[in-house]
Image (cartoon, rainbow, N blue to C red):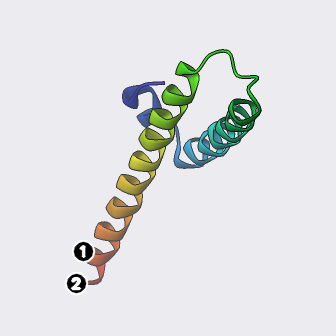
Amino acid sequence: MNAQEIRTLSTDEVKARLSDVEEEFFNLRAQFTIGQLENFNRLTELKRDIARFKTIVGERERELGAEAATSEG
């Protein structure tokens, strides 16, 4: 999933998808550890997706913090 697609989602949807992707990553890591993983590239894709999700959540949280600071001051 690319960043543009993620940005179209609401913050709650992004957090829910992040949770799903992290769970899938955990499961694939377990398969990798016991030697059952066939598609190693999927681990890389998931790591990048997790980073994208976390980046966008962080951006949104900083935006909310900046808006709150400007409304107080």
Q: Residue at x 38, y 31 (%)?
A: 3
**Between 67 and 6, which is closer to the camera in this rendering?**
6
Query: Which mark is on residue 73?
Result: 2
- Residue 70: numbered disc: 1
Q: Percent from the top left, x then y, of residue 64?
A: 38, 64
| Near-viewer residue (63 or 56) | 56
For this view, does 73 lie left or right of residue 39?
left
Kind of residue sitting beneath label 1? Thr
Residue 43 percent location from the top left of the image: 56, 29
Any mark on residue 37, and which?
none
The residue at the far bottom in this view is 73
Q: Quadrant of residue 51?
A: top left
Residue at position x 34%, y 63% in the image:
62
Q: Is residue 41 left or right of residue 21?
A: left
Instruction: Determine whether, in the image, residue 47 is placed left or right of residue 63.
Output: right
* Callout 1: SS: helix
Residue 18 on image: x %, y % = 59, 43
Please report contact status of discs 1 and 2: CB closer than 8 Å, yes or no: yes
Q: Residues within 10 Å of mark 2 (few under 14, many from 20)?
A: few
Disc 2 is placed on an element classified as loop
Q: Residue at x 29, y 77 (%)?
A: 69
Query: The C terminus is located in which quarter?
Result: bottom left
Q: Position of residue 17 (x, y in %)?
A: 62, 39
Q: Mark 1 Cα within 10 Å, few/some/many (few <14, many 20+)?
A: few
Which quarter of the figure has residue 37?
Answer: top right
Q: Quadrant of residue 38?
A: top right
Disc 2 residue type (three-letter): Gly
Residue at x 39% of width, y 54% of height: 60
Residue sticking out furthest to the top: 38
58 relative to 53, above or below = below
The correct choice, above or below, for 67 with respect to 15 in the image is below
Vertical position of residue 72 compared to residue 14: above or below:
below
